[in-house]
Image (cartoon, rainbow, N blue to C red):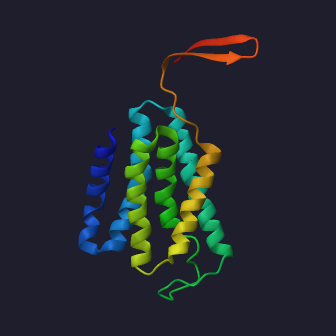
Amino acid sequence: MRPALAATVLLLAGTQGVLAGTESMGTNVAIALPVIAGGITLIKDDWKGTAQVTVDTIATVGLAYGLKQVIHEQRPDKSDFKSMPSDTSALGFAPAQFLWDRYGWRYGVPAYAAATFVAWSRVDAQKHHWYDVAASAGLAFGVSKIFTTSYQPPGLRYGVTPTDGGLYAALDYRF
């Protein structure tokens, strides 16, 4: 799936939210992001990536939810003391960071744009402070660095590396 197509799907996923408002649209995009990231892994027949996006998303959202229970930061709208961090933003940033780490910036940039919209929608709705959503982005970054590896498509790989005693040549095939 091309990044432009992914951005189009995200836009369509959030269209319903236009009628209900920015907050609803941001929530729809947050829900769509992990689904689209998982879809990209399936299209690429990347089962390891499917497992990694699942673990990344569950760990990031779970960590955000757990921290929310411990950190008592009042929401800007004064509705409760569960502002820090934003679990909705964590749901958006986890697959965005996964896509960047796994497949590179061409997938990461559109996903990060969508996740940033999710974060903005949470701040705009006065459900979170800017630093709540920034903390969620930081959690997603850290968790992804732990669990995500770079995608290695199947095929022939080769390389030559100079060493002190000469050269090291490698040839392998990934299935």
91 horizontally vs 166: left or right: left
Query: Horizontal placement of 124 versus 50: left or right?
Result: left
Q: Residue at x 72, y 17 (%)?
A: 163
Front-most of residues 137 and 70: 137
Please state the horizontal and vertical placement of residue 120, each as a whole percent of the image: 41, 70
Q: Residue at x 55, y 64 (%)?
A: 136
Position above or below: 128 against 26: below
The residue sitting at 51% across, 89% down in the picture is: 78
**Looking at the picture, does residue 166 appear above or below residue 147?**
above
- In the rendering, at what x and y percent does residue 25 appear? 33, 67
Identity of the residue furthest to the right in this view: 165
Q: Is residue 119 above or below residue 115?
A: below
Quarter residue 138 falls in: bottom right
Number of numbered discs visible in the structure rendering: 0
- Give percent across and percent down for residue 159: 58, 16
In this picture, is 117 found above or below 149? below
Quadrant of image for the N terminus: top left
- Please tell me which residue is depicted at 29% across the width and 68% down the height of the picture: 17
Image quadrant assignment for residue 135: bottom right
Q: Quadrant of residue 162?
A: top right
- Residue 27: percent from the left, percent from the top? 39, 66
